[in-house]
Image (tube, rainbow, N blue to C red):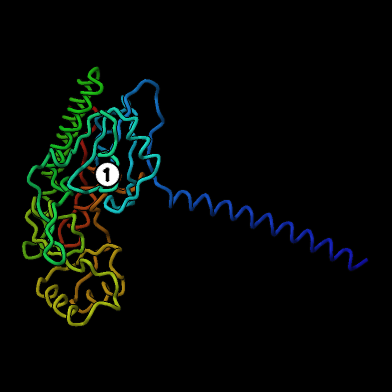
Amino acid sequence: MSLTINTIGMRNFLVILFLLQFILSACSNQNNVKNTTSLTIKTPEKKNLPKVVATTSVLCDFTKQIAANTVNITCLIPPDINPRRYQVEASDRNAIAEAKLILYNGYNLEPAVLNLIKASKNPAPKIAVGERAVTKPKLIIQEGNKRLNNPYLWHNPKNASLMVDIISNNLKRVAPENAKLYAGNGKRIKDEINKLDKWIKLRIASIPSSQRKLITNNLEIGYYTQAYGLKYETAFVNISNYENFSSSRLKPLINNIRQSRVPAIFINNLVNSQLAKTVAKEADVRIAGRQLFGDNLGMPGSESDTYQKMMVANTRTIVEGLGGTYLIFEPISRSQK
């Protein structure tokens, strides 16, 4: 009898254990789907509205701010994925095929998506917003002196305003009945960007002049530093492995940072943390506690999930890191004209 009871108890225990494993596995799979699948962000469709595709989170944000609920917007590249490394999916091809307007940045920011756009037989307007906004972009000089067009134009607010105009004008082509709305929203956004530009200048001016130098591995921030008179120097670029980084290369880097007399360096998570800590310690500087947003906006609900909020977040990171005074930016409310 004792053996029977124990056997039944063991069977019950195994059943419970199996159910727990099943539940945990299901939860884990849901989390994995959320984190690893392409976040082709598509707002719930409303019937009979034009379909618009925007490749990047910056373009998508501008389009949403201008168009509001007058179009069905599909955003292809998630905010947490580098547009240069994004791999297209079948849903992207379908969205491009059905769109009445396709907005992409250009200057090879989103190469995989651009190949889809070029291959599409959809006669809808295909607008290279970045290329039209800035016809003579800055250059990025990579290892081996390879020069590439810098596609991260929006980090200069004046370029961002031009991008807003281009998006607004092309939305009018697909939904002319909303032209007045698009013009009004576009003006409001540009007014806020202009206010933001003036605010950034004041915050950068609060940094001691001897410390207005940005040392970072962020190649995307060049338009920002040029717009606001910051000396800009890249470090750690193409370096991710501490073990493969020779001391002969480490010493000049440390000396250069030490001689710059900056209080902090700005490093993202592409650099081995041990390497960054070693360099910072030897150069007697801090690693800025906040990261810069370069190739995309932040995730929905974050402090940088719109263009304006991203620019504020980056300015705060730079100003606080270099010893300036950060003050809260007051955006223009929708009721203001």
Query: From the viewer's perspective, is residue 203 above or below residue 336?
Result: below
* Residue at 9% across, 58% down: 230
How far from the left and from the top, in percent, is residue 122?
Answer: 29, 30
Q: Name the residue under label 1.
A: 115
In the foreground, 116 or 60: 116
SS class of the residue under badge 1?
helix
Q: Is residue 302 visible?
A: no
* Residue at the limit of the structure toward the top, as seen here: 177
Q: Quadrant of residue 277?
A: bottom left
Q: How crowded is mark 1: few (under 14 residues within 10 Å), some or many (20 or more)?
A: few
Tell me residue 253's x, y (percent): 16, 75
Q: For the image shown, how many numbered marks are present on the structure?
A: 1
Identify which residue is drawn at 26% across, 72% down. Answer: 276
Q: Which quadrant would the C terminus be assigned to in this image?
A: top left
Give the x, y percent position of residue 176: 22, 19
Residue at position x 93%, y 66% in the image: 1
Indicate the position of residue 185 as horizontal and vertical percent values.
21, 28
Q: Which amino acid does label 1 sit on?
A: Asn
**Relative vertical location of residue 61 with respect to residue 147 in this rendering, above or below:** above
Find residue 114 and report its image quarter.
top left
Relative to 169, say whether 264 is above or below. below
